Each structure stands twice: as structure tokens, then as C-alpha cells.
Image: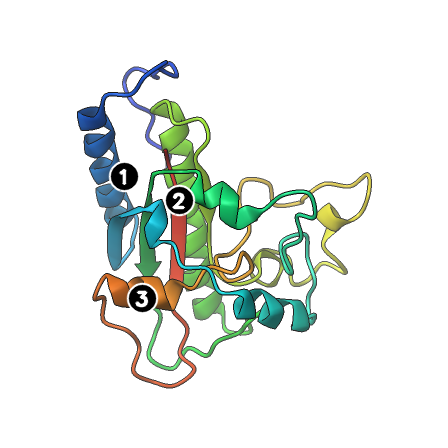
Amino acid sequence: MLPEIQQPKKVRRIPAQRDPKEVKKDLQALRKRAIELGASDAAVINASDVVFRKALRKQVAADMRLPSIHWPLEYPKDDLEAAIKAYQNGVFFRVKGDAKMPDYGGGQVSDLTHRETMQRVYEIATVLESESFYMGYHLAVGFATGNCRAIFCAKESRCWAAVKGRKCVQPYKGRPSMEAAGMDSVAMARAKKWRLPKREGAPLLAGLVMVV
């Protein structure tokens, strides 16, 4: 179940110009909100801090165990890296997994506890994205981790959002992951000096919401 989305007492209009001090304050509020929702680390980042690596997208494209609308991620008419770089700031966060959690890639997440942990990344991304919208940042966009079909719809015969004329059966939950978009969350976490998993193959359960 998604955490309750906290609307500001007054929903803001989209301003013609933004006060840099207010933006800075809002970003810090969203960072703190990520921690409240269960993130073990969260940081305000610049768009220039987002690291893209083509090898990640190739790795995702090769993992077709549970293909979905978001895995692999294909936007043939859009340059996702350019779109992200058009932002200025966002909130990068992660959720701590248990010590034995494997990297499921795009495959089914067999362990219920692991699936619930990964769901938390999606939930935080959804809440931050939604609350950013209420704060007047109408172009906020969030990314989670893993394959949303594997986490929310593994029992479905296919990803229905990928079928023409059908729609996602888990709206507001399913979304692209950082790795499917080619974003290197490990490199970004290392730049923030976050403590990384020591075990080889251990996943970093990270999410990103670009706000403004």
C-alpha cells in the first residue's frame, strides 16, 4: 500500500519564475520526506550528478525473462539522457536491502520480503513525484529499481501496458527503473560517499526523482 501523500496546506500554482531560496527549501523537504518514508540515504543532486552508462541499457535489453513496458525501456523518439539533463535538481535515494538479497535483474523476485523492500523504492518515488507536483513542480519525474512487472505483476501472463489498447493494471505504481534508463546508481552513490554493499553482486536499491 502506498504511503499517504501529503498535500501542502495550499496547492501552489506553477510560477512564471521560481525563487531559488524556495526551491532549495523544497528540495531539502523532499529529501527529508524520503527518509521519513524509509530511505536509508537521500541527497539533493544536480542533473550533472546523474551518471549514464550505455552498458546498463544493453544489459537490461539482454534480460528478457519478464519483458514489460519499462523493461527494456525504449523511447525511440526521445533522448532520455538529454531529457534528464534538462532538469536542474532532484532527489536521489536508496532503500537498504538485507545482506543476502541477490540482484534479481529483470526476473521474478521470489522472496516476499525482498519484493516488499523493492516496492518501497517505488512507493518513495511515487510519493516524492506526487508531492513535487502539488508544490508546483509539474514536470517532476521519478525512477525506481528493477523491473516493475517482476515486482507488481509477475503473476500476469504479460505486461498489459505493452499491449496496444490495454493499460497498466498497476497505475501510479509501475514506473521505469534507473538501470533500465541507463543510470548508474552505484557510481552516483559512490560519489555521495554512501556505504556500498561489500558482497559481490549485491544490488543497490536506489531511486531518483528529478524535480525542477
- Who comes first in sequence, dot 3 or dot 1? 1
Residue type for callout 3: Lys
The crowding category of the residue bearing disc 3, from other C-alpha atoms within 10 Å (few below 14, some 14 to 19, many at least 20), is some
- Specify whether 177 is left or right of 78: left
- Is residue 1 shown to the viewer in this render? no
The residue carrying mark 1 is 30
Question: As displayed, is residue 5 above or below residue 66?
Answer: above
Question: As displayed, is residue 16 above or below residue 115?
Answer: above
Question: As displayed, is residue 67 above or below residue 130?
Answer: below
- Specify whether 151 is left or right of 141: right
- Picture coordinates of residue 125 (x, y %)? 41, 46
The answer to the question of whether label 2 and label 1 lie on touching residues, with beta carbons closer than 8 A, is: yes
Residue type for callout 2: Val
Q: Residue at x 82, y 38 (%)?
A: 165
- Picture coordinates of residue 187 (x, y %)? 35, 67
Residue type for callout 1: Leu
In the picture, the disc for residue 96 is 3
- Who comes first in sequence, dot 2 or dot 1? 1
> How far apart are the two marked residues, 2 and 1, measured between alpha carbons?
10 Å
